[in-house]
Amino acid sequence: MRTILHSDLNNCYASIESISHPEYRKIPFAVGGDEELRHGIILAKNECAKKYGIKTGEPLLTARQKCPDLKVVKPNFELYDKYCTAVRELYGEYTDMVEPFGIDESWLDTTGSVSLFGEGKKIAEEIRARVKKEFDLTVSVGVSYNKVFAKLGSDYKKPDAVTVITPENYREIVWELPVEDLLYVGKSTKNKLNGCGIRSIGELARTSETFLYSKLGKHGKMLHIYANGLDTSPVTRVSEADIVKSIGNSTTALRDMQNLADVNIVFHYLAEQVCRRLRSHSLKCNAVQIYARRKDLTSFERQTRLKNPTDISGVVCEAAINLMRLNYSFEQPLRAVGIRTSVLVDSNAPVQLSFFEDAEHTEKMRSIDMLKDKINAKYGKRSIYRAVLMSDKTLLPEYNKEIYSACFNSH
Ligand SMILES: [Mg+2]
């Protein structure tokens, strides 16, 4: 039997901010968007803010209504990344099979480490104690014999806790929980299952696989396997190099995007950032994915393959805009959009240029990008930017405020 741990940093962003500001621990505190612009949502909150009913993802405005004294700071993703990477390195001392899930969660396969460090529960307790002592952060850890139950275990009791789910006790612990607590049961699956009278994971487990298949297709079959503790998916070892499988960026616009022209501006901004990162890693992408969140918080994703690998902002941006044009007609305004590039290859790998491609034009676009990188590196990111970013200053996020004021005040 395998020993799988799932470790989750509790209230990650808020906890990391509290390391340098211990006074935040005693007050309702959250990390979120820009308040001056009455924009932004709660990205993370501490235990104290939770007591006011403040939820991740809710607008700052309503959070303020629930708790007028809420202290809010802007996110510092670089800092969070630093801590999360350090915590993952600590996990690496117990096994080389560590699979990150988001920034602050990881699965660990410690099957082979039991003889060295003791059983799963002991390893989990040790990790919990060490993260607290060495980082001043807390984790909740689930210990089980498959990934799905390990993840459930880390959600079961938090913060700063360990939950063990075994073949003997899973019926008492897991089967009592509502279906939506199971991995990959989102809102729409929950509604479908509830519509069939399936409310708990136990009810899901006891429903016939054939019936679930008829209602949910393959996904239904998979959930049946999960609910019965029969998940056998491996913890995939991820080296730092493998993490760069895709490079992307997304942003919530300052105001809702009403049409393709609005999205065009934001996509230019995102494509610039994404491609700069591709170039800095000497990578090119073969596929572009877009992500969009509507005003009602529902979202969609679409992707396309490119004819040739690229790291040119203009090419990625054009692919993203085409995807949006083909797939969305703005029945509802959009709140956030993102661009992700994937199927990455070394930028020096030889490429068979297609016969109709204007290689000269492509090279020109590329040299403009490279030159822009150089100027930005030397004189700062405000020194040069695309004119399209200036065409509507009400859209882009707060960190561009400086660019705007530099531009509009001096010209
Ligand atoms: Mg977490």
Image (spheres, grey):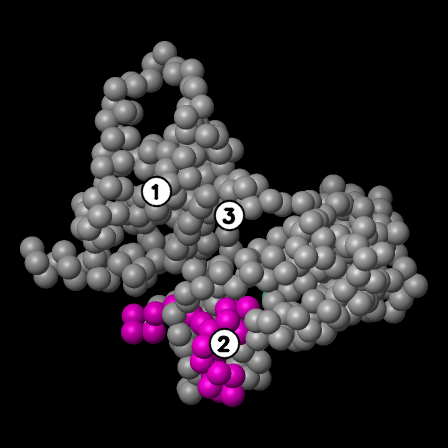
Q: Amino acid at mark 2?
A: Ile
Contact between marks 1 and 3 (CB within 8 A): the answer is no
Q: Residue at x 54, y 42 (%)?
A: 241
Name the residue that disc number 1 marks.
276
Image coords of residue 347 (percent x, y): 41, 29
View extreme (front): residue? 116
View extreme (left): residue? 411
Q: Earlier in the sequence, mark 3 or mark 2?
A: 2
Q: Amino acid at mark 3?
A: Phe
Q: Would residue 99 be found to the left or right of residue 103 on screen?
A: right
Q: Which residues are magenta?
A: 10-37
Image coords of residue 219 (percent x, y): 72, 45
Disc 3 is placed on an element classified as strand
Name the residue that disc number 2 marks.
19
Image coords of residue 246 (percent x, y): 50, 41
Instruction: Tell me the tag on residue 327.
Output: none
Does residue 300 sit above or below 316 in this rendering? below
- On the question of residue 23 being in view, the answer is yes
Image coords of residue 123 (percent x, y): 76, 64
Does residue 160 sit above or below 367 in this rendering? below
Kindly tell me whether mark 1's CB lies below 8 Å from ligand 1.
no
View extreme (top): residue? 355
Q: Quadrant of residue 341?
A: top left
Residue 207: say if magenta: no
